[in-house]
Amino acid sequence: MIRRDPSLKFVCPVCEASPQERCHVNDRIICFESHLERRELAVNGIAWNAASASQDVQLPRKWRAS
């Protein structure tokens, strides 16, 4: 069973792997897991999306879509 990795939605800040591309150490060696920094992006991104979708959270004006 393949588990979907939410961090694959983001560009990796360490190895610069594109979205939907697995992290790599160099061009030949693919990592089993995403880099920690990429996983943190995913956790923060998911938390941000959940918070911004909530009616209780007011986004600062500069962050709102115009």
Image (tube, grey):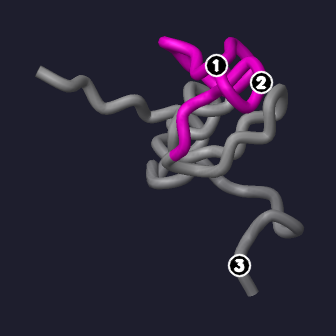
Q: Secondary structure at mark 2?
A: loop
Spatial distance from mark 1 to mark 2, Cα to Cα? Answer: 6 Å
Pinpoint residue 18: horizontal percent, then vertical percent. Answer: 66, 50
Residue name at image x 67 percent, y 26 percent: 28
**Around disc 2, counting alpha carbons within 10 Å, would you say few (fewer than 14), some (14 to 19), or many (20 or more)?**
few
Of all residues, the one furthest to the right in this rendering is: 62
Q: Is residue 30 above or below residue 56?
A: above
Q: Say which residue label 2 marks.
A: 26
Q: Say which residue label 3 marks.
A: 65
Contact (Cβ within 8 Å) of mark 1 with mark 2: yes
Contact (Cβ within 8 Å) of mark 1 with mark 3: no
Magenta range is 21-40
Of all residues, the one furthest to the left in this rendering is: 1
Q: Secondary structure at mark 1?
A: loop
Main SS, magenta region, reads loop
**Around disc 1, counting alpha carbons within 10 Å, would you say few (fewer than 14), some (14 to 19), or many (20 or more)?**
few
Numbered tag placed on residue 2 in the rendering? none
Spatial distance from mark 3 to mark 2, Cα to Cα? Answer: 38 Å
Spatial distance from mark 1 to mark 3, Cα to Cα? Answer: 40 Å
Of all residues, the one furthest to the front in this rendering is: 28
Q: Nearer the viewer, residue 35 or 64?
A: 35
Q: Is residue 15 above or below residue 32?
A: below
Q: Earlier in the sequence, mark 3 or mark 2?
A: 2
Residue type highlighted by circle 3 = Ala
Pinpoint residue 55: horizontal percent, then vertical percent. Answer: 46, 54
Residue type highlighted by circle 2 = Asn
- In magenta segment, residue 43: no
